[in-house]
Amino acid sequence: MNTALKKGWRPILVLLLLFLLWEGIVRFVEAPSWLVPAPSLIFQEAYNGWSQFAPHLLSTTSLSLYGFAIGAAVGLAAAFLLHMLPFVRESVYPLLILSQNVPVIVLAPLLVIWFGFGILPKVIVITLVCFFPITVAALDGFKQTPADLKHYMKMAGATKQQLFWKLELPAALPSIFSGIKISATYSVMGAVISEWVGARMGVGVYMTLASSSFRSDRVFVAIFAIMILSLLFFSLIKLVEKLMVRWKWKETKAK
């Protein structure tokens, strides 16, 4: 705990210095607030307009959690399938890589055309953003299973399923959680992108309305909210990882 506190104050101090520098430069050059608002104006708008912004934030949060849960499930299922069936992995894995080369912002309008303005196209966007890091991380984790332990279990007569659940999956958990943490932060971005295309509520809608009316302070409020929400998701996944992969944290602490 003391170590975390000693390390935690440094980024906070750097962040405060950046805000002070930002405030000073804006006031010195007398930049118009609609172009580059000072941090003080942004925080003031966040406080005064919280009642208006909170429903949008709540909508994006629930959408992100819903999409992330589905994306994580799809990513893990895909990783398990590709790992257990090598011939499927050889056939499908290149297609998964190609799917990530298509910008999500390009797919989003097509999904709206195909599935309407409901929640389905938004969830598909978040799923497409989230599942790939988890699948790749899980597959890499399965490959890192200690060969000597794997050989020992095979000699002991372990079946392929026993080998997976007793050895390969536990060994891959650190890698899986690395992919989950990345996907958790991506889920917020995916939710905002899907809201840009078509939604009635959400941080993406709030940003669109603010930018169209040249309310840069509100745009920055939305940006800071996205950053904080992503950081919160990342911290929660990290806490779950610490509870589930205790042996890894003990090794790290010992080093």
Image: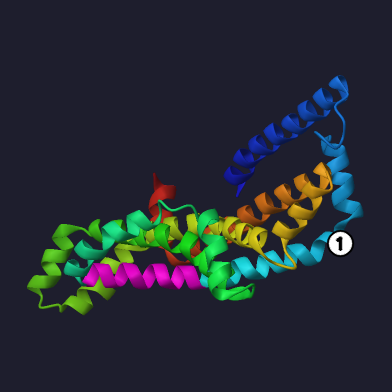
SS of the residue under disc 1: helix
Task: Choose top left, top right, bottom left or bottom right for residue 141.
Answer: bottom left
Which residue is depicted at the point 52% across and 71% down? 69
Q: Position of residue 135 (x, y in %)?
A: 36, 62
Residue at image location 72% in from the left, 53% down from the top: 225
Q: Residue at x 50, y 73 (%)?
A: 70
254 within the magenta span:
no
Q: Which residue is mark 1?
A: 52
Picture coordinates of residue 75 (x, y %)?
40, 67
The image shows residue 131, relative to residue 189, as above or below, that is: below
Please provide percent x and percent y for residue 22: 77, 29
Relative height, residue 171 to residue 114 (above, below): above
Q: Residue furthest top?
A: 28
Magenta span main SS: helix
Q: Which residues are magenta?
A: 70-84
Q: Is residue 80 magenta?
A: yes
Answer yes or no: is residue 149 visible: yes
The residue shown at (36%, 73%) is 77
